[in-house]
Image (spheres, rainbow, N blue to C red):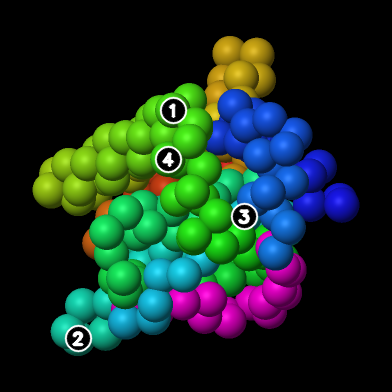
Amino acid sequence: MDHIWYLEKVDLFKVLSEAEISFLIEIASRKTYEKNDVIFMPGDPVNTVFLITRGRVKLYNLSPSGRESILFIFLQVEILGLSEIFGNNLRVSFAEAIEPTELLILQRVKITQLLEKNIRFALAIAQTLGMRLMQLGKNFESVSNQNLSCRIAQLLLNLSDMCGVENGQHTLIEQRITHQDIASMIGAARQSVTEALNVLIRESAIKYD
């Protein structure tokens, strides 16, 4: 099955044997989503975990006024919906496709059965969730900083740690992020973010393509 090719590219699954991977994907399925399609929302049952095989997905919450607050942006070959398999029976956030996206849908029961048998797999998941929690903490810390430029700079540093690639003396963030994405992630207006980014560009603090 070509599902195995995707799983082998995910660090989380590299601790599994070929037999364990086959067990994990024997009832897996694929589903495609168009841009802005909602994958799940608060109150949906937690029966599945998603591996992104193409595209990008944002995880976010909505304030009572309807304002969007992005928690994470997940890229190709990342796992979505992992944290909620531990104890939660209902989703607590929204997940939405940022662009045309394809997901490999894995069953929660399969993952929990492997967790009970493979301590290395359990430790790998704990490490992944720990890193995400640390990243979320950094994002909240950035939001509490009242200087918009500092909030943007901290977010870019956080993204650099997550998905940056060394490029000479610079670090390239290959993840495609719009000004609105940045605004949603730091709790600011898009126009203000654009103005602050333009200042950083003029000061040669960042380069933007």
Residue 150 placement, left or right of 60: left
Q: Give the residue at x 21% y 78%.
A: 63
What residue does disc 4 label?
Answer: 116
Give the numbered dot on residue 119: 1
Mark earlier in primary sequence (3, 4)? 3
Residue 201 forms part of the magenta stretch:
no
Q: Give the residue at x 49% y 60%.
A: 108
- The boundaries of the magenta stretch are 28-42
Where does residue 30 sit, x and y in percent of width and height? 73, 68
Seen in the picture, residue 19 relative to 3 is either above or below; the reply is above
Gap between marks 3 and 4, in whole Å? 21 Å
Between 62 and 116, the one nearer to me in the picture: 116
Where does residue 74 sit, x and y in percent of width and height? 53, 53
Q: Residues within 10 Å of mark 1 (few under 14, many from 20)?
A: few
What residue does disc 2 label?
Answer: 65
Residue furthest out toward the bottom = 65
The amino acid type, in three-letter code, at marker 4 is: Glu
Can residue 12 be seen?
yes
What residue does disc 3 label?
Answer: 51
